[in-house]
């Protein structure tokens, strides 16, 4: 085939966007070589701007906004004129599972709001009798977070999540979220949680938190939460009795909860120890504390609120710390495990000094453990400073006592 001359460019075809196709047609008509097809030019798409951070509002406004959203969402799914029974499974901190003065205020406001604006909802006490009737249940979390809404770094606001679930159908039917300013929020734990000596991850508490934070409307309720809700109602009654100084009644309720299928949980063991201790039954309290230690070691993390004097490695006077450490040493030795003791601190002050002080306190506890039981040097001490804060507000008071905990963890080797 003879070599053909290239086709001359056509201003018209380029101007009107016909491009390569028009050039090919021209080649067929005139016998010239069509222009090569040019690949399309990729146009970079600028990245989408991140959404602006959620602006926190005053605490009362956040409570009202979230509660209004839940009540309105539940009404939209109900029949006209239908009256619904609602119980509130007490709200908690979304990391620690603790109840506080703030979560109690939220619950009181929800009850008042139902009476004022939503007469279709009959709010009843959270009790085993009410739960057996399969009512709607409200759960909620109130958690200090940073500007990105995460439970890390400097806490700037409270993330508030509120959900209503229908036990009859086993699904989430309404959800409300809000962000509250930190001003005016009293995060002091209520009596039982203030006095509880230990903290660890607990599947029952996690299922409660996930029922609020990890679900959307229409999702099924966590099976773990459903399986434990009757036990949770008995535990809630026990906590109320403890906070009212009715220790004998509280002890009977904790014992009842312990016999239930979901009774193997942190709140029950803390309650059995505390009520016996408050009643002066030291032998029973010591035995109950031993079971609490075993539960923590089984979960591979046991955080103890062992309080030291400010900026010191000396223990506060008057606490039952010697018994606590003796039980931890004895039960760890019986298991023949390697134990890592980690000191923690709040974020206030110098990070370097906090890390050093947390290590010195862990080393002090290490020496006590070695003296209390034949652990044969199977204990190591580390300091975490404020890197593992659960609350992170830096308040340095009862509200963030868990940030100054000493944590015990079973490790593979020493």
Image (cartoon, rainbow, N blue to C red):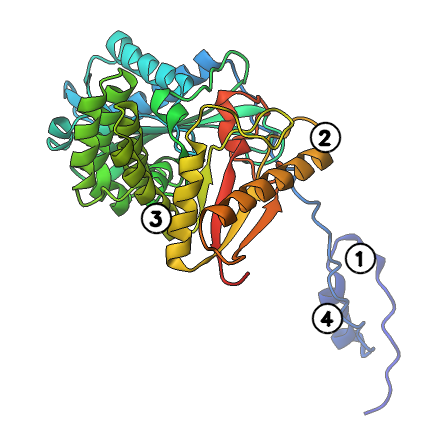
Residue located beneath label 1 in the image: 14
Q: Quadrant of the N terminus?
A: bottom right
**Residue labelled with disc 2:** 350
Residue placed under numbered mark 3 in the picture: 294
Q: Which mark is residue 267?
A: none
Q: Quadrant of the C terminus?
A: bottom right
Label 4 or label 3, whichever comes before in sequence order:
4
Q: Nearer the viewer, residue 248 or 374?
A: 374
The residue wearing badge 4 is 25
Q: Secondary structure at mark 4?
A: helix
Is mark 1 in CB contact (under 8 Å) with mark 3?
no
Residue 337 visible in the displayed image: yes
**Callout 2 secondary element:** loop
The first of marks 2 and 3 along the sequence is 3
- The residue closer to the viewer here, 23 or 99, is 99
Judging from the image, what secondary structure is the residue with disc 3 in?
Answer: helix
Around disc 2, counting alpha carbons within 10 Å, would you say few (fewer than 14), some (14 to 19), or many (20 or more)? few
- Residue at x-position 54% and y-position 57%: 377
Q: Nearer the viewer, residue 272 or 116?
A: 272
């Amino acid at each position: 085939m003879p070599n053909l001359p290239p086709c001359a460019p056509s201003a018209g075809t380029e101007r009107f966007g016909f491009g390569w196709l028009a050039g090919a047609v021209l080649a067929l008509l005139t016998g010239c070589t069509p222009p090569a097809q040019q690949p399309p030019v990729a146009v970079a798409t600028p990245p989408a701007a991140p959404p602006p951070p959620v602006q926190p509002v005053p605490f009362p406004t956040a409570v009202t906004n979230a509660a209004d959203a839940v009540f309105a969402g539940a009404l939209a799914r109900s029949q006209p004129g239908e009256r619904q029974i609602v119980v509130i499974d007490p709200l908690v901190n979304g990391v620690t599972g603790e109840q506080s003065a703030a979560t109690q205020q939220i619950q009181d406001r929800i009850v008042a709001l139902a009476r004022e604006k939503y007469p279709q909802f009959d709010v009843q006490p959270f009790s085993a009798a009410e739960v057996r009737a399969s009512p709607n249940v409200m759960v909620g979390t109130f958690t200090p977070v940073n500007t990105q809404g995460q439970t890390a770094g400097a806490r700037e606001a409270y993330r508030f999540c509120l959900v209503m679930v229908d036990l009859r159908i086993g699904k989430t039917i309404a959800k409300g979220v809000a962000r509250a300013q930190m001003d005016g929020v009293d995060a002091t734990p209520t009596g039982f949680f203030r006095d509880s000596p230990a903290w660890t991850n607990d599947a029952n508490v996690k299922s409660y938190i996930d029922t609020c934070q990890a679900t959307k409307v229409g999702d099924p309720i966590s099976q773990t939460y459903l399986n434990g809700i009757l036990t949770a109602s008995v535990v809630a009654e026990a906590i109320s009795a403890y906070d009212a100084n009715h220790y004998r009644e509280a002890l009977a309720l904790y014992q009842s909860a312990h016999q239930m299928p979901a009774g193997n949980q942190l709140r029950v063991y803390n309650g059995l120890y505390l009520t016996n201790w408050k009643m002066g039954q030291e032998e029973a309290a010591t035995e109950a504390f031993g079971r609490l230690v075993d539960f923590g070691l089984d979960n591979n993390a046991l955080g103890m609120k062992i309080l030291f004097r400010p900026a010191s490695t000396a223990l506060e006077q008057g606490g039952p710390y010697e018994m606590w450490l003796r039980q931890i040493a004895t039960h760890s030795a019986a298991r023949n495990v390697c134990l890592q003791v980690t000191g923690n601190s709040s974020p206030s002050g110098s990070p370097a000094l906090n890390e050093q002080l947390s290590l010195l306190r862990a080393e002090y506890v290490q020496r006590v453990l070695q003296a209390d039981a034949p652990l044969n040097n199977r204990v190591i001490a580390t300091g975490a400073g404020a890197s593992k804060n659960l609350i992170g507000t830096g308040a340095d008071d009862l509200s963030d006592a868990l940030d100054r905990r000493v944590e015990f963890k079973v490790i593979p080797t020493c």
